[in-house]
Image (cartoon, rainbow, N blue to C red):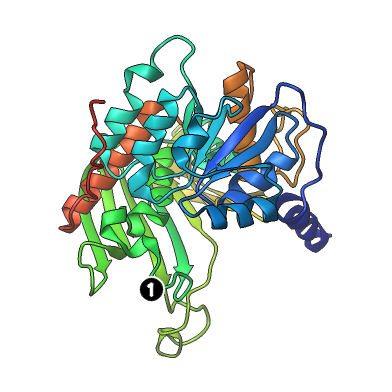
């Protein structure tokens, strides 16, 4: 049954979402760029949303835009990005351009009065992020909505993981955290924009944005110190990280580690490392949290404590499959002696909200579909799940990435020529 459930969620969520009738006041999206991520991140999720219409696309190459529009049934093609922004029929803009263009075209979109769904990372660096998210246009009455698209956070699975760390009575303070994501070696071609410094590329600007965001979510606070940062840089471009591993410390002394690798090899289980070191590495994205031991009960000289570890498997595509492992180690002590100990392990899944915060939600809803639901809710002033990525969060994210690059001895990604004060 689990296998058929996976097939259904993949088919309905990613391949052929069931279409719905659109409302007359549906939000009309324009796409800046004919990107490869848009079908997964917005075009397919929009099919099942009655308040979203994908209305237009613009690309630097009109021929490419026309082919893209035909493939995805998008009715309007604009010759330039600016032409799309000036289209009075467009309410919201989806930006999945190269990282170095995020700041400029987000601000241009906001100036045009459009809401913005902005792919991560929000900007090339923290200077741009502060200028964008603190812009006066976003603080005015009736301001456009701007959201950095950390889609994984909107899925009930991530929030279930987060709750097991921060909301359960048996959850102590987070002591250690770990987040890792690997892309198999060879998955990204050598001429890809991710390998270009001038386009704000690198592992920390791609998978590293997720692992950084995960650590910050697990700790529920900022990382005040980069303890160590070890990049694997490209020979042809030393400031571009193919992979990054880094460790951090919070203000209360907790420690966290991230690993982000865009060309991972080796690490195959049950096989000698020498046999697999040149083979592409496979595996689920993973996040772990180790909590401090805390006292549950103390009476008549006996102390009952519990120490929790929580692991989240596959937070990036939880609608396909995910698992939250909760392991509680109980100990009963008399003085300093442990007289009894046992473990309680739970394996949990959450494809839907337990209390139905999203109307009409289905188990096959992807993290992108849940994200779109909240984006629409915010624009229309509706209550929803309450999950959001606010301005402070997005700024803190880029500050942490910049600090990691500095600790690694790499240059922070260049600031846009577009006037930061404009």
Residue 335 appears in the picture as rendered: no
Q: Nearer the viewer, residue 382 or 195?
A: 195
Residue reaching furthest left?
409
Q: Position of residue 218 (x, y in %)?
A: 43, 41
Residue reaching furthest top?
141
Indicate left or right for 242 with 7 as reference.
left
The image shows residue 287, relative to residue 415, as above or below, that is below
The residue under label 1 is 190
Residue located at (26% from left, 44% from top): 249
Indicate left or right for 143 with 362 as reference.
left
Indicate left or right for 251 with 331 as reference.
left
Residue located at (23% from left, 41% from top): 417
| Quarter the N terminus occupies | bottom right
| Quarter the C terminus occupies | top left
Q: Position of residue 404 (x, y in %)?
A: 24, 50
Where disc 1 sits, the SS reads loop
> How many numbered callouts?
1
Task: Using a 10 Å C-alpha cutoff, classify the residue at mark 1 as few (fewer than 14 neighbours), some (14 to 19) or many (20 or more).
Answer: few
Residue located at (69% from left, 35% from top): 53
Q: Position of residue 358 (x, y in %)?
A: 70, 29
Residue 321 appears in the picture as rendered: yes
Q: Nearer the viewer, residue 118 or 260?
A: 118
């Amino acid at each position: 049954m689990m296998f058929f459930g996976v097939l259904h969620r993949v088919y309905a969520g990613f391949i052929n979402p069931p279409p719905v009738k659109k409302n007359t006041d549906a939000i009309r999206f324009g796409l800046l760029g004919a990107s490869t991520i848009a079908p997964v991140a917005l075009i397919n999720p929009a099919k099942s949303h009655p308040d979203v219409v994908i209305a237009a696309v613009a690309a630097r190459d009109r021929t490419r835009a026309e082919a893209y529009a035909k493939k995805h049934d998008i009715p309007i093609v604009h010759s330039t990005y600016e032409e799309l922004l000036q289209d009075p029929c467009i309410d919201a803009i989806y930006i999945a351009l190269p990282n170095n263009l995020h700041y400029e075209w987000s601000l241009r979109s906001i100036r045009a009065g459009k809401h913005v769904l902005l792919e991560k990372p929000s900007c090339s660096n923290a200077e741009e992020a502060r200028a964008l998210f603190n812009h006066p246009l976003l603080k005015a009455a009736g301001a456009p909505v701007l959201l950095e698209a950390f889609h994984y956070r909107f899925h009930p699975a991530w929030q279930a993981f987060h709750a097991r760390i921060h909301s359960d009575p048996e959850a102590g303070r987070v002591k250690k955290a770990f987040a890792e994501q690997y892309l198999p070696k060879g998955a990204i071609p050598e001429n890809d924009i991710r390998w270009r410094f001038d386009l704000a590329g690198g592992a920390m600007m791609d998978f590293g944005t997720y692992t950084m965001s995960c650590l910050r979510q697990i700790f529920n606070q900022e990382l005040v110190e980069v303890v160590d940062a070890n990049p694997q840089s490209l020979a042809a471009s030393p400031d571009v990280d193919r992979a990054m591993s880094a460790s951090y410390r919070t203000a209360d002394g907790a420690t966290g580690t991230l690993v982000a690798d865009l060309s991972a090899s080796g690490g195959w289980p049950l096989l000698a490392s020498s046999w697999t070191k040149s083979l592409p590495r496979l595996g689920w994205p993973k996040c772990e949290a180790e909590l401090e031991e805390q006292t549950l009960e103390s009476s008549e000289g006996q102390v009952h404590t519990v120490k929790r570890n929580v692991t989240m498997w596959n937070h990036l595509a939880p609608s396909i499959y995910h698992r939250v492992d909760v392991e509680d180690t109980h100990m009963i002590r008399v003085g300093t002696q442990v007289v009894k100990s046992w473990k309680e392990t739970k394996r949990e899944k959450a494809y839907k909200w337990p209390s139905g915060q999203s109307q009409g939600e289905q188990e096959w809803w992807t993290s992108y579909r849940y994200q779109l639901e909240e984006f629409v809710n915010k624009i229309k002033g509706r209550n929803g799940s309450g999950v959001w990525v606010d301005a402070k969060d997005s700024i803190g994210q880029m500050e942490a990435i910049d600090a990691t690059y500095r600790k690694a001895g790499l240059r922070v990604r260049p600031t846009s020529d577009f006037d930061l004060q404009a």
